[in-house]
Image (spheres, rainbow, N blue to C red):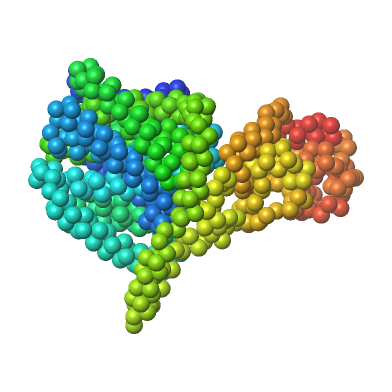
Amino acid sequence: MIEDLCILMLTAGIVSLLFKAFKQPVVLGYIVAGMIVGPHVLGDALVSSEENVETWGEIGVLFLLFSLGLEFSFKKLIQVGSTAIIGAGTIVVGMMSLGMLTAYLSGLNAINSLFLGGMLCMSSTTIVFKAIEDSGMSSHKFAKVCFGILVIEDIFAVVLMVLLSSIAVKNSFEGTEMLLQIGKLIGYLLLWFVGGIYIIPTFFGKFRKHLNDETLTIFSVGLCLGMVLLAVRAGFSSALGAFVIGSILAETLEAEKIEHLIQPIKNIFGSIFFVSVGMMIEPALLLEYWLPIVVITGVVIIGQIVFGSLGTLLSGQSLRVSLQTGFSLVQVGEFAFIIAQLGENLNVTNKALYPIVVAVSVITTFLTPYVMRLAYPTLDFLNNRMSPSTKRLLDNYAYNINKEKNGPKMLSSIIRKIFIFIVSLPGINRIFKRFNDNLYAREHRAEQNKTVSSHTEMSLLSLDIHVSEFTIPTDSKFCGKSFQELELRSKTGVSVVGIIRGDITINVPGGNRHIYPNDKIVVAGTDTQMDAFQELLNASIDKKIEKDVKRSNIILSNIRVENQSQLIGKSIMNSRIREEAQCIVMGVTRDREPYVFSNPNPALIIEEGDMLIIAGERDRIRQFVERNM
C-alpha cells in the first residue's frame, strides 16, 4: 500500500511540475500521471492494487466536495441574483438537452443519454477562474457573472447526482419517482441545514478558545465523515453529505480557517482521484472513438458559447458581458468525472463513455484560454453587422429587465407576512434569533470590513460599473504617495471608494490620504477603466533589484580592547559603533574588577582590557574592529 502511494504521488508530482512549467492546468497533469501508472499505457500497472487507488479516489471525491461546500453558501443563492439563476438555468437546460440529443443520435439508450447530458451541462469552477486570472481580467464585470453561474451549476450538480443515482438503480425514468426524490432531498437538506446552523456555530462559539489548528482540523474531518454516513444511510450519495456539511461550516466564523486547514488534505486525496480517472483511460479506445470525441468537443464549445451568452443576455446583461461569459464556460468540469464514475460504478453507462468524456474534458480545458480570446473579435463582428434598431432593442430589454429585478412585490409581501407570523409564535422567536445570528455572523463581520455594502455591489452589477479590489505590492511606486499626487481618476477614470488596511477600513479616502504597502484599494469603474488602472499599477512596480540586498545574519561577537585601541577612554556613545558599524554593545566585562555591565549606559567609558559583547552583522563588526583595534 505504501509502495503504491509512493508511486502515485511521485508520478503525479513530477508530471504536474512539467504541466506547471508549460502553464497548463495541474488537473491535466494528474490525469496524464494516471495514464502512466495505469494498465493501459505501459502494459502493466505500476501500482499493485488498483482497488486501493479506487478507495483513495473515493475519499478524494469526498474532500473535493467538502471543500466546494466550504467555498459555497446557501445564502449565495439569493446573493448571486437573477443574472446567475437565469444564466445557469439556460445553460443547464440547453446543454443537457443538447447532450441527450447527441447521445440519442449516436445510438445510446435513455440512461446513457441522461448521463451524458448531465456531464456536459456544467463548467469547471477551477479552470474558469484560473483562465480568468491568467488573462488578467479578474476585475472585469463578467468574472462576477461567471462566479454566480458556477455557484448555481454546482448546486444543480449535487442534486443531479442524487437523481441520477436513483434513476440508474431502477434503470428507468419516472416523473413521479423523480418528484418524490426531489421532495425527499429538499426535506433532508432543510433538516440538516437548519439543525446544523443552529448547533455547530453555537458549539464553536462556546469552545472557540480551545479550537487550535489541530483540534479544528480533526473536528471538521470528523463532521465531514459523520455527515457522509448520515447521507448514505438516508439513501443519498456520500458526495452529497460531504457537500452539505461543507456548506454548513461555510456559515461559521471559522470557515476561512477550516478551508485553509483542509486544503492540504484535499490536494492529496483530490490528486489521487484525478490520477484514478487517468488510470481508467484506454488510449486504444480514444483512437477508436476519435469521431465521438471530436463531435462532443464541438458540441460543448459551441453549445456553451451559445447558451452561456444567451442566458446572460436574457438576464439583462450587455452583449459584451454576455459574450465574455459564454466564451469563458467552454469546458467540461470536474463534476463530469464524478458523474461518469457514478455511471461506471453502477454499471449503467457504456464503457466507452467514461474515457470519451475525460478526453473531451482534457481538450476543452486546454482550449479554454484560446477560446476566451475570441470573445472580443466576435463582439466586434456582431456590432459591425447589427442594425441600430437591433442594438436599441437589446439596450431597452436590458433596461427593463434590470428595472424589474426585484420580482413581484405582492408575492414577496405575502411570504414575508407568513414568515413574521411563524417567527412570532411562542418559543420560536428565541430559537429563530439564535439561528439567524449563527447564519449571518460571518456576513456581519465581513460587512463591517467592507467599503461597499453587498446590496450596493449587487445593484452595481446590473449597471455598466462595478467594484474591484487591488492589492498594492510592496515594491510599487504608489507606496508613500497620496491620491492627489497619483491623479488616478484623471489617468484611468476609476473612483477610489475605499482602502482596506489590515483590520482598518477607510471609506471614500480624501486626496491627502497616502497609500502604504499591501493596502487593498477598492475602486469603482468600467472594465476599460479597470484595465487602465491595472496597467498603471503594473507599471508602478520597481523592477530594479538593489545589489546590496544580501546581508549576513546578526551575530554576537566578543571583542577585546587591546592597549593600542582607539576606543580606550571613549564612552560607548562617542565610540560611534552604532553609527559606523550599525552594531549594538550588549555588554561589557572587566577582568580586574569582576564587573559585568549588561545593556551598559551609553556614557560608560571603555577601558583597556574590556571585553565588548557586540551584536551586529559579521562583516560590519570585522570592518569596525580593523579600523579601531
Q: Is residue 430 above or below residue 54?
A: below
Nearest to the observer: residue 246 or residue 553: 246
How many numbered marks, from 0 up?
0
The N terminus lies in quadrant? top left
Q: Is residue 297 left or right of residue 230?
A: right
The image position of residue 168, as x and y in percent, is 13, 43
Residue 235 vertical placement versus 149 (above, below): below
The quarter of the image holding the C terminus is top right
- Residue 236: percent from left, percent from top: 19, 52
Query: What residue lies at 41% left-to-right and 51% top-to-bottom?
Result: 82
Q: Residue at x 21, y 32 (%)?
A: 101
> Above or below — where is 527 with respect to 66?
above
Q: Residue at x 28, y 62 (%)?
A: 190
Residue 455: in sight, yes or no? yes
Residue 440 versus residue 6: which sits nearer the camera? 440
In the rendered image, the residue lying farthest to the bottom is 426
In the rendered image, the residue lying farthest to the front is: 389
Does residue 212 show up?
Answer: no
In the rendering, at what x and y percent does residue 379 appear? 50, 30
Q: Residue furthest right?
A: 569
Location of residue 288 with respect to 133 vertically, above or below? above
Residue at 16% across / 35% down in the picture? Answer: 112
Q: Quadrant of residue 530?
A: top right
Residue 515 location (% of width, % of height): 70, 46
Drawn side of residue 349 relative to residue 194, left or right: left
> In this image, 405 relative to 153: left or right?
right
